[in-house]
Amino acid sequence: MISHEAMHLAESLAHYALIVMALVYILRIRWFLGFVAGKERQAPTGAADTNPKRGSNYSLAIIAMPWVMESTRTKPFLYLQFVLFHLGVVAGITLSFTIPFAAEFTALPIVQIIFKSLIGAAFVVGVIRIIRRIGNIYMRAISTPDDHFALWLLTAWFGFAYFAVSMDGGMAQYIYFWMTMFFLLYVPFSKISHYLYYPFTRHYFGKSMGRRGVYPIRRGPAAS
Amino acid sequence: MSSNSNGKQRSHKAEMLLERFGKKLNRQVAGSLVACVHCGLCTDSCHYVQTNPGDVTYAPAYKADRLRKIFKRHHDWTGRVFPWWVGAKSVFTDEDLEELKDISFGKCTNCRRCTINCPMGVDFATFNRMLRGMLVSVGVMPEGVAVVSKDQWEIGNQMGVLKEDYIDTIEWMSEEMQIELDDETAVIPIDKENADVVYSINPREVKYDPRTISDAAKIFHLAGENWTMPSEGWDMTNFGLFSGDDDLGGAVSGMLYDKVVELKGKKLVISECGHGYRSTRCEGPNWAKRDVPFEMESSVITMLRFIKEGRIKVDKSRNPEPITFHDSCNNARSCGLFEEPRELLNLVCEDFREMYPNRVEGYCCTGGGGAMSMSEYSGRRLKSAKVKADQLKATGAKIVATSCHNCVDGLSDCIKHYDVGMEVTQLVNLVANALIIPEKPVIVPVEKEAEKVVAEAAKLAGKRVLIVDDEPDILTFFSTVLEDNGAEILTATDGEEAVQIAIKEHIDLVTLDINMPGKDGGWVFEKLRTTKETQTIPICIISGKPELRRLIYERSVPAPDGYLDKPVDEDMLLRNVRKIIELAERGELASISTS
Ligand code: SF4
Ligand code: SF4
């Protein structure tokens, strides 16, 4: 059993790490916005029912429309993994708040089941992704040490978070908080911060594709 | 050589490349460089990956990482502090640049198929083009790219077509149209001011495929369009798109825009060419950094409009064969031009069949991104074309139509290499073929008609034509037609015999087949052009294999004086033979004056 003080310290550090992460993110965004945006001067092409704004909105929502892109449409299992993995991240972060600030709520059986299912599924996906990243020749070729480490880190974090859900104040929960702290400090320096750029890349690409009548994608009536 | 922070030596070119990189980066590209999560979802969207299983160097993210590594090393501080950890790496030697060249030019056609399949919105094709531009700016590029870029900078079009050749071809097509429509007003107006439409073309049309010009002219004329073709600044293609050279891109599109403004044209219509359409219509204003004060439109949309407005009438039963459509990547994936060609095909063809996948998900013809000009990568290109060949075969169609000259060449090579047994055509040819030409209630007095026949026949009287072809039926047909019109005929069935006859005899014109056993037409052509006794003889290529055109046009001798696709009918043969002989007599054949 970990002492109450030690556990409290771990919890607090995790929350301070969140503040540090937010600060580094602000610096990152400032750095990114330092690049001047390219200007599009062309008159619209393609279908008349779309425009840059519609293209941008569609582009931002594309991640929730797996049927749109061939890459997600034809690989539903990979898409499912993506969904479960990211839900697990949300659940894991939420847990770091509910344990110290809403212990009674976290202890509710239904809440426990939800947390455990989401985080457990994410852990399984993490393991599958590790196997894919190491076993698939293409994945290996494009992976950096950061890619590998980030995946191992998150998968291990899911593992400890899974046991931390049971609120026993034990070692798993203690490690989970320390890992959360490390994870939050590491995130802005690693590929895990991709979601920071996602709105920008998708917005700019969607704006351009909307102007050119490519977004929303039309596949034709009989496309296979 | 100059040294870098690690004490490692960096070549001058590598140093310059890094300097350019900093200047070219914008937010869109920086976003694409930082956002990749290495998820690998884009991997098998690339036709190169599909045809080279296990070779990771073709994977889009692997290719993209070549530039991403440099970005991280020089522009992202995590890569500056922990380069190994995030895979950051700089370039130092000229060999490093050669490796980048091999990837960016030789392993990607910038088709954007991976881009459209990336959940993060990483636009690899766009920054690969930027990488090409950086390499070009330090003189590292495939030879073909250097040659074509030079032509476009110096001559103003990417095939080095001289102004006199261009004007000559337009006038020739104009005369053909007059004869075909039997209408003196059916001309191609050049440099007409205040036209509603200024029509721009691809130099390939002048050099290899003038029929697309006459077909378009026929359509404009029958639609009653107030149109013109510019005498200069007429090339709507733009090698800047392929080479990544924005300055070239801006200069070329600027020339075109300037000409339309000078002519006070209301609309610029762009003939069927994917990269030309994208360059002129979409990217040109960005490269040239100017707003364009007139409308621009693809000729596909123009033709569709003519039909819908009832300005031309078509009969789809004239195109009865099963036909499929190949979407040019630039048209579909980068400009949203994919429904109009289908609508048009359904109006002018009886049996249109989709090819799958299509529209923005279609596969590259594999000749995109300037690949046709980079002969060192032809092997890779043809290997990757297997994906397209399989797509084509699955349609069961006899003809594949496309709206791009580059795709015509890419598809022709693919079809030949994989023995697909299909013809390639463009929409303009199909529309022209389906045109219903209104009857003219004009009665020509019998004497006048007779005078005309005599005058036409006189043009060939006593002229000696050498017909070179290995097919006996063709020899007989051409000989009969030309003899009946007063010409004296000599024939040869193989290359060496043809050259011997041409050296010994006085010949006014050679009609030359390309595909012959033994010495082919390409060899004969070069021999005739380089032999003192024969170099001024006009030559008209008549071939049934358009894909072999390169055997003729890639030689460094003056281009042939005429080019006809088999099958050739009596009228077409006579018109062209007469025209060449007439121009030769007036000393107006460009090839002869430059030889
Ligand atoms: S480019 Fe996009 S799809 Fe490809 S690996 Fe990167 S994030 Fe994934
Ligand atoms: S742009 Fe096309 S050719 Fe290039 S990597 Fe992507 S899919 Fe392959």
Image (cartoon, coloured by chain):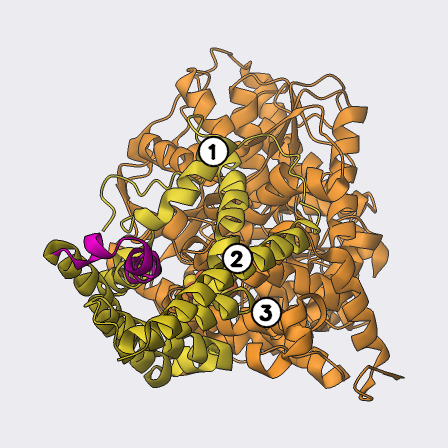
Chain colours: A yellow, B orange
- Quadrant in the picture for residue B65: bottom right
Locate the C terminus of chain B and report the quarter of the image it occupies.
Answer: bottom right
Locate the N terminus of chain B and report the quarter of the image it occupies.
Answer: bottom right
Label 3 sits on a secondary structure element that is: helix
| CA separation in Å, label 1 and label 3 | 44 Å
Which of the two marks, 2 or 1, is nearer to us in this view?
Answer: 2
Q: What chain does mark 2 sit on?
A: A
Label 2 sits on a secondary structure element that is: helix
Majority SS type along the magenta span: helix
Which of the two marks, 1 or 3, is nearer to us in this view?
Answer: 1
Percent across and percent down for residue A10 are: 41, 70
Q: What chain does mark 1 sit on?
A: A
Along the horizontal axis of the image, is B83 left or right of A152?
A: right
Percent across and percent down for residue B502 are: 70, 68
* Residue underneath mark 3: B521
Q: Residues within 10 Å of mark 3 (few under 14, many from 20)?
A: many
- Quadrant in the picture for residue A1: bottom left
Q: Is mark 3 within 8 Å of ligand 2?
A: no
* Residue underneath mark 2: A19
The number of callouts visible is 3
Looking at this view, is B6 or B511 the one in front? B6
Q: Is residue A210 visible?
A: yes
Identity of the amino acid at label 3?
A: Gly
Q: Does B177 appear in magenta?
A: no
Whether B279 is drawn above or below B115: the answer is: above
